[in-house]
Image: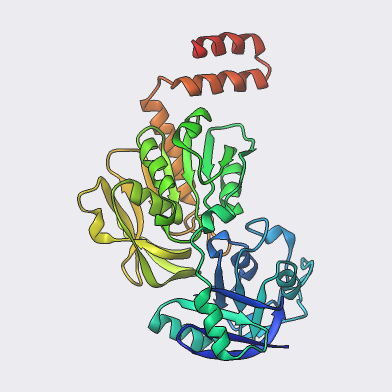
Amino acid sequence: MQARLLLEDGTLFTGKSFGAEGDSVGEVVFNTGITGYQEVLSDPSYCGQIVTMTYPLIGNYGITRDDFESIRPFIHGFVVREHEIVPSNWRAEYTLGDLLKEYGIPGISGIDTRMLTRRIRHHGVMKGILTTSDKRVEELLELMKATPLMTDQVSRVSTKSVFGCPGTKERIVLVDFGSKSGIIRDLTKRGRDVVVVPQDTTAEQIRRLAPDGILLSNGPGDPKDVPHAAKMIAELLGEFPIFGICLGHQLFALASGADTEKLKFGHRGGNHPVKELKSGRCYITSQNHGYTVKEESIAGTELEVTHINNNDRTIEGLRHKKYPAFSVQYHPEAAPGPFDSSYLFDEFLTLIREHKESNPVLPKQAQIAAAYQAARTGSANAAKGELHYAEK
């Protein structure tokens, strides 16, 4: 079956359909990764977008359950040069086309993805429509114009309820703005007690969970579309150690008084060089974002820049000068991409320990939580006394 991709500037690509049938409108972006197409598809940060893979052969190792970064894909379309319909991989459970059909996502292959990528780089990301219908181009342009781009992506991909991943060490509250599973994996393999909360959780609700630290996850869209999150972060700054990743980094900046802006075509792929200013070392990072923190907005805040992008000099890392809080624009959990930056999770845990050592008096909520934990592990009598004291 034929498929077509029409950009809002009138550029038309015609190729072969795979995946689901129908019309789908979204922001057309490109990813420069060589591998990891399943992790790209299941990354909630792509919610509402039509994703172009610049690597020419996609689908050759199929789809396997263990490689998902979320419970399901949230993209609106998938664009590739060549789609392999028969995967060669002993781990493969089904094909790329099967996955797209299951979730109603159209795909197109057989087009010049180099031309499409260069057009996006030159003109910037733009709206597009991917269709298997026989509508005229004029009809497609009208449909595209009448369909607004999504602005509520975070609420669509965030968990709707609190859930925990038990551990024996410090408690980390992970605020889910569209978190990848890799973040939870990196925390739990270090033995941390992870509590995942929805994107609209208030500062007071987080306090009641008595965290030792707070991690702000990645997520889709414009950080200014979730002002309640920046407000929550501002209220908790200085009270708990905070680590922001991707969208969490941008929200941390907004909460600290800085500003953000949209990039021309964003950073998406597993091969982006980032320089750590303190050491001068360059890390190859995994990235997926369309917005950045404005450099000039840092002046007058308590923030300092810790990392920059070696390609376009945009801000890739921030640290608060006064409070135990820092953030990075890229993905230290990778998936897909290199694991060069996973040390940042250890730096976050070190920051938590230093904060606890310098603040030996536990807040009331933490005393209650400690007593509850003692009760769970069998110290019932001691826990009752601690709980009574804490409640008083």
* Left or right, 212 with reference to 19: left
Q: Residue at x 61, y 10 (%)?
A: 384
User: Percent x, y for residue 226?
Assistant: 44, 52
Please say whether residue 186 is visible from this viewpoint: yes
Please say whether residue 328 is visible from this viewpoint: no
User: Percent x, y for residue 23?
Assistant: 64, 78
Considering depth in this image, is 353 or 8 the residue closer to the camera?
8
Residue 310 image-quadrant placement: bottom left
Considering depth in this image, is 349 or 64 the residue closer to the camera?
64
Q: Is residue 343 above or below residue 120?
A: above
Residue 78 image-quadrant placement: bottom right
Coloring scheme used: rainbow
User: Percent x, y for residue 10?
Assistant: 48, 89
Q: Which residue is drawn at 49% across and 90% down?
A: 11
* Left or right, 181 with reference to 93: left
Considering depth in this image, is 3 or 88 the residue closer to the camera?
3
Considering depth in this image, is 79 or 39 the residue closer to the camera?
79
Picture quarter with the N terminus: bottom right
* Left or right, 376 with reference to 338: right
Q: Residue at x 47, y 64 (%)?
A: 287
User: Percent x, y for residue 70?
Assistant: 64, 56
Q: Residue at x 37, y 67 (%)?
A: 262
Residue 237 image-quadrant placement: top left
Q: How many dots with numbers?
A: 0
Taking the view exactly as shown, the residue that stands out farthest to the left is 300
